[in-house]
Amino acid sequence: MAPGNILVADDDAAIRTVLSQALSRAGYDVRTTGNAATLWRWVQSGEGDLVITDVVMPDENAFELLPKMKKSRPNLPIIVMSAQNTFMTAIKASERGAYDYLPKPFDLRELVSIVGRAMSEPKNRVGTAPNADLEGMPFVGRSPAMQEIYRALARLMQTDLTVMISGESGTGKELVARALHDYGKRKKGPFVAINMAAIPRDLIESELFGHEKGAFTGANQRSAGRFEQAEGGTLFLDEIGDMPLEAQTRLLRVLQQGEYATVGGRSAIKTNVRIIAATNKDLSGLIRQGLFREDLFFRLNVVPLRLPPLRERLEDIGDLAQHFFALAAAEGLPLKRIEPDALDRLKRYRWPGNIRELENLTRRLAALYPQEAVTGQLVDMELGGDSPAIVPGYIAAPNAGHQRPTEPHPTLAGAIERHLSELFREHGASLPPPGLYHRVLREIEYPLISAALAATRGNQIKAAALLGLNRNTLRKKVRNLDITSMRAPR
């Protein structure tokens, strides 16, 4: 006996055949059609236990049909497929009551797994009403890595689950947090962001929870904290790894009990906010070093969401660059187009600053150069050289032309190589004096450790964490290298 009946609608006969065969092998009865009218007739007559439909069909868009199907049969699971693989496609599918969304091309095994999960769940899922405010596109990119982000966001929009966003600087963590708010159930409430790394550590508790008049020197009047400002909405805690332990303890109480007290206050204040946190640090490493509370991590990490760095989504660079050029043109700068050799150069760059660095580059190119076409030479000039093999940060191409990269060529390695070449040239045919290894190592370690200590204001525990060293190892190196300056950089 078959476990269920599935209706498949897609105007591509090949896709209908592939889906029919895969689902039939899994034991389902399958009925297929190439138009929306037939699908709608089947649904109205009560046929099918699950629907799989493409978005674009010859007679009607599935997003127009979805609300009608959900109104007619609220508990019917509907899986939407689409080659229009954008964030808004995923959001529209979720808003119109789809059980799940799959970008084309998709993995057949994944689709069969989703069908099995949908068929085994209680038939009490009711779709939400369409959102009339779905305009604009907060994200750009159609890479597989971004498709996973879109699908995850679509599932999270109508929940109040706490989300932990991780990713390198410049990957768009606040953009994701804002999207969760702007397209979620709390969109009518305030969105309040606080960056832990940008606030003096002794003021973070006051910034978060507010303070009473006279609570500390300079507290001349009562001040509302970010929790109070975000009431009914979303509080975005950026760079959560920089939060002091004392503030972590107070935040944990808020997450556990749903209440807090102002600095200098005695009464508990109930709070109703959604928490979204973000970090570019390894919180697991900070936990091992005693710099981040493990219990707080588990409270914040209910739904982990990792944003890919730009080097993991190189196929999106062309769309992103054109998007940023269009934004620059909307601000009055000349509209640019990217030549193929320029796009090739962009895809071979390592992008340490991620999307933020790409946006800054496009703005410079739009502002500084009169020509409409952005060439590879212009890109090389702006990124610091005239050959992709030696431009700092480039991924070196093995041969000339537009081949894809194979070996990284980091900035530091290139600088060391040039330094050693100069050193050998200075000595001509003779070898440099003995001890070259330790000499070069010292030249690297001294500024690296000094910079880490300066950045952490001389705190060796934090500097060790920043460098990934054991504290005792760092202390020994500081002593051996005779590092005494620990002032914060200006």
Image (spheres, rainbow, N blue to C red):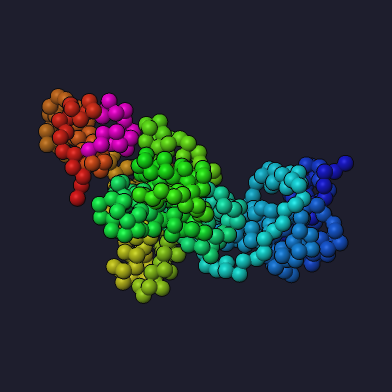
Residue nearest the viewer, comparing 178 with 316: 178
Is 319 covered by the magenta stretch? Answer: no
Q: Position of residue 136 (x, y in %)?
A: 52, 67
Q: Position of residue 404 (x, y in %)?
A: 44, 48
Is 175 placed left or right of 400 in the picture?
A: right
Q: Position of residue 295 (x, y in %)?
A: 48, 36
Q: Position of residue 37 (x, y in %)?
A: 79, 67
Residue nearest the viewer, comparing 400 with 328: 328
Residue nearest the viewer, comparing 384 with 362: 362
User: Which stretch appears magenta?
Assistant: 458-474
**Does 95 appear above or below 246?**
below
**Does 183 appear above or below 455?**
below
Q: Main secondary structure of the magenta part?
A: helix
Q: Residue at x 17, y 26 (%)?
A: 480
**Quarter of the figure that contains the N terminus:** top right
**Does 164 appear above or below 53?**
above
Q: Residue at x 12, y 27 (%)?
A: 433
Query: Residue lying furthest front in this view?
Result: 266
**Does 470 appear above or below 350?**
above
Question: How many discs appear?
Answer: 0
Is 464 covered by the magenta stretch? Answer: yes
Residue 380 visible at all: no
Is 24 placed left or right of 471 in the picture?
A: right
Residue 438 visible at all: yes
